[in-house]
């Protein structure tokens, strides 16, 4: 059931936190679905994302469950392995996914946004609804709109279930089917 987006009651401007350029979000493991669209392509499938303080591992799958890419990030950098078992390396997830997959994955911010938070490393604007729940974040050129929340057994507050991310003409929709916050 699709609900109408809520109207912002309050908008909060946040400033970067000193020394937060290496901040890491709380650990989580999620399963979900992803849809990507821009002027040149569209893709939909599923994903599994394990985020730990030491790094990230994201697996992207076709709707039929075939592997599309494995993206790993740790203190040494980023690795992307394609379905053809080709490995690519870079320092930055956004530039690597743009080059290999044709769209940017904003992993540094997304580790926070997926949990309904802004990244403390950069300034942001957050829109809150009447229940003081985040319904939108604008940060690093991205607009994140929260369409739905779900209660998780492993978290005290409801966690985002449906997120729409927009960066210029790129649109990414994430639907989280299973949350495990560690």
Image (cartoon, helix red, strand yellow):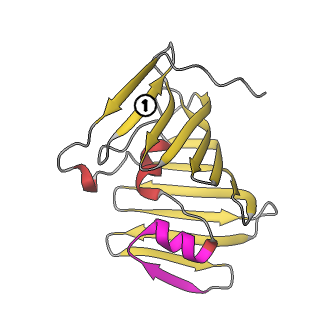
Residue 100 percent across, percent down from the top left: 59, 77
In the picture, residue 59 is in which quadrant?
Answer: bottom right
Residue 42 percent across, percent down from the top left: 75, 61
Residue 88 percent across, percent down from the top left: 51, 83
Task: Give the class, few, some or many, for how many residues have Cα within 10 Å of label 1's Cα (few <14, many ≥20).
Answer: many
User: Which quadrant does the N terminus fall into?
Assistant: top right
Residue 55 vertical position relative to residue 146 in the rendered view, above or below: below
For residue 35, side relative to residue 89 (left or right): right
Residue 28 vertical position relative to residue 105 in the rendered view, above or below: above
Residue lying at the far top of the rendered structure: 130
Was residue 87 drawn as part of the magenta stretch in this picture?
A: yes
At horizontal 22% and vertical 42% (from top left) the residue drawn is 17
In the picture, residue 37 is in which quadrant?
Answer: bottom right
At horizontal 58% and vertical 48% (from top left) the residue drawn is 166
**Of 4 and 44, which appears nearest the observer?**
4
Q: How many marks?
A: 1
- Looking at the rendering, the stretch of residues picked out in magenta corresponds to 86-100
**Can residue 182 be seen by looking at this rendering?**
no
Residue 125 percent across, percent down from the top left: 40, 34
Residue 68 vertical position relative to residue 144 in the rendered view, above or below: below
At horizontal 75% and vertical 58% (from top left) the residue drawn is 44
Was residue 24 drawn as part of the magenta stretch in this picture?
A: no
**Can residue 29 be seen by looking at this rendering?**
yes
Q: Which residue is mark 1?
A: 126
User: Which quadrant does the C terminus fall into?
Assistant: top left
């Amino acid at each position: 059931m699709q609900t109408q987006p809520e109207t912002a009651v309050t908008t909060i401007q946040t400033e970067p936190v000193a020394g937060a350029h290496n901040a890491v979000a709380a650990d989580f493991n999620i399963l979900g679905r992803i849809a990507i669209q821009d002027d040149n392509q569209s893709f939909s499938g599923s994903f599994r994302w394990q985020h730990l303080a030491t790094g990230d591992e994201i697996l992207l799958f076709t709707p039929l469950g075939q592997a599309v890419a494995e993206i790993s990030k740790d203190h040494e950098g980023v690795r992307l392995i394609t379905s053809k078992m080709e490995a690519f390396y870079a320092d930055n997830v956004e530039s690597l996914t743009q080059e290999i997959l044709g769209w940017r994955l904003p992993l540094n911010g997304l580790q926070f946004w997926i949990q309904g938070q802004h990244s403390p490393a950069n300034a942001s604007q957050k829109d809150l609804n009447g229940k003081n729940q985040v319904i939108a974040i604008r940060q690093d050129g991205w607009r994140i709109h929260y369409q739905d929340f779900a209660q998780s057994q492993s978290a005290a507050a409801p966690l985002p279930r449906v997120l729409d991310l927009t960066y210029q003409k790129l649109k990414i929709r994430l639907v989280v089917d299973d949350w495990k916050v560690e």
